[in-house]
Amino acid sequence: MSVFHSGFVAIVGRPNVGKSTLMNAMVGEKVAIVSNRPQTTRNRIMGVYTEKENQLVFLDTPGLHTPRTRLGEYMMQTAKEALQGIDALVVMVDATAVGKHDESIVADMSQYKVKKALVLNKIDLLKKEALLALMEKFAQAGYDDIVPISAAKGDGVEQLRSLLIGYMPEGPKYFPDDMLTDQPERDICAELIREKALLHLRDEVPHGIGVEMMAITKQSDNLTEIHATIYCERAAHKGIIIGKQGAMLRRIGQEARADIETLLGTHVHLQLWVKVRENWRNRMDDLRTLGYESNE
């Protein structure tokens, strides 16, 4: 009789090193939003990869940073909690931009008494000599394996998945074969809207954006109606989000709708509103409203 292996794998690193891209690649579906903005991931997001005799449960965490708001504090608490009870740890760095913050994270995470892989991402943008030097630099860092990959292009992803499967102990099938994430559809829809806003808006706006799902109504087997509100912290930002004659809001809505239709498997009628909610990232009631619940 074959033995089933399973376990939980946390993916950590500073903001914007490619953690969500890696988890999506590992799972084989888009379960976490991706952008080139730091701090895209705010909640712990779970992705599940299941094959015949193995199951990997990935925990994609917010990027490790010094918090400046209550939202930032919540994000760091979320990242810390994800490290409890894991079976393996993936510590990720951007191989093209390794700095003191990365080195500090690599050193701190090496103390965890679980199987650990140090993943060097974005190797497609790095010369071979520089990659070899980086691998040599971290050779004695205390990790079981150092794995160079390009999460965006898929290079090395299969090898990393196989390595992580080898880390897993004997265990149960925690989730059904067809389950890819624990996120409710409502939350994924909100995140897809936020992703498009992150993609198109100026640098100073995205960190102050939150999305609240007001209603999701299935009108028929082939039509879902969604009402959502995009919150920002300043009146000036509201105009930027809406854009000239509503052009930016339409663009965000059109691109989000396409992804939501793929997710839900129906046509979607998406209505978006923009409202100002000053300093919401520091207000606990607003954080709860937008889905950032603290366990403390």
Image (cartoon, helix red, strand yellow):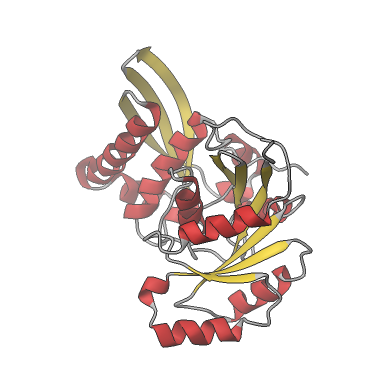
Q: Is residue 87 left or right of residue 67?
A: right
Image-quadrant location for residue 285: top right
Task: Say which of 165 and 128 sits in front.
Answer: 165
Please state the total of marks drawn on the protein image: 0
Residue projecting furthest to the front: 1
Seen at 65% across and 73% down, the residue is 106
Query: Picture coordinates of residue 281 (x, y %)?
Result: 58, 50
Q: Is residue 76 visible?
A: no
Task: Say which of 156 and 200 sits in front.
Answer: 156
Task: Say which of 228 and 55 sits in front.
Answer: 55
Seen at 79% across and 63% down, the residue is 113
Q: Is residue 200 left or right of residue 60?
A: left
Task: Say which of 232 and 121 sits in front.
Answer: 121
Measured along the vertical axis of the image, is residue 90 above or below residue 251?
below
Name the quarter where the N terminus is drawn: top right
Seen at 38% across and 83% down, the residue is 127
Measured along the vertical axis of the image, is residue 6 above or below residue 117?
above
Q: Is residue 152 visible?
A: yes
Query: Picture coordinates of residue 216 (x, y %)?
Result: 44, 22
Name the quarter where the C terminus is drawn: top right
Measured along the vertical axis of the image, is residue 79 above or below residue 185?
below
Query: Picture coordinates of residue 68 (x, y %)?
Result: 62, 62
